[in-house]
Image (spheres, helix red, strand yellow):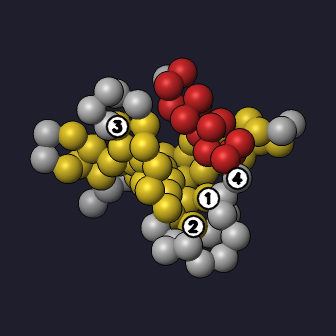
């Protein structure tokens, strides 16, 4: 069972506590983060940069790019 960690993120003067789950994938891992009712999957690409996969299938409003950038910046600062 995967443990849920609360990730503190600051964006446009607001503070968010986003639930994050680390999901092992062979020799690597994915980060599943719940944002605005959607699940975003973050994983590192071949260059070590985070790529984001939106699991909502394009339904509803997209998560803002600014908030995604704030999440990535928070993860990189850890």
**Quadrant (top left, top right, bottom left, bottom right) of the N terminus:** bottom left
- Res 69 quadrant in image: top right
Q: Label 3, label 2: how many angstroms apart (C-alpha)? A: 20 Å
Q: Is residue 34 above or below residue 74?
A: below
The answer to whether residue 62 is above or below residue 64 is below
Look at the numbered disc 4 and give the secondary structure of its residue: loop
Q: Earlier in the sequence, mark 4 or mark 2?
A: 2
Give the percent coordinates (x, y) of residue 74: 58, 30
Q: Point out which mark residue 38 bears.
A: 2
Residue at 23% x, 48% y is: 24
Q: Quickly name the residue at label 4.
A: 64
Residue drawn at (33%, 48%) of the image: 30
In the rendered structure, which disc, 3 or 2, sits on the residue that comes first in sequence?
2
Secondary structure, mark 1, is strand
Distance, label 4 to label 2, CA atoms, is 12 Å
Distance, label 3 to label 1, CA atoms, is 19 Å
Residue 61 x/y as whole percent: 70, 70
């Amino acid at each position: 069972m995967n443990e849920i960690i609360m990730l503190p993120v600051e964006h446009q003067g607001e503070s968010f506590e986003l639930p994050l789950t680390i999901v092992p994938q062979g020799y690597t891992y994915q980060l599943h983060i719940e944002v605005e009712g959607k699940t975003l999957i973050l994983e590192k690409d071949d260059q070590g940069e985070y790529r984001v996969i939106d699991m909502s299938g394009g339904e509803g409003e997209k998560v803002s790019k600014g908030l995604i950038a704030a999440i990535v910046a928070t993860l990189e600062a850890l």
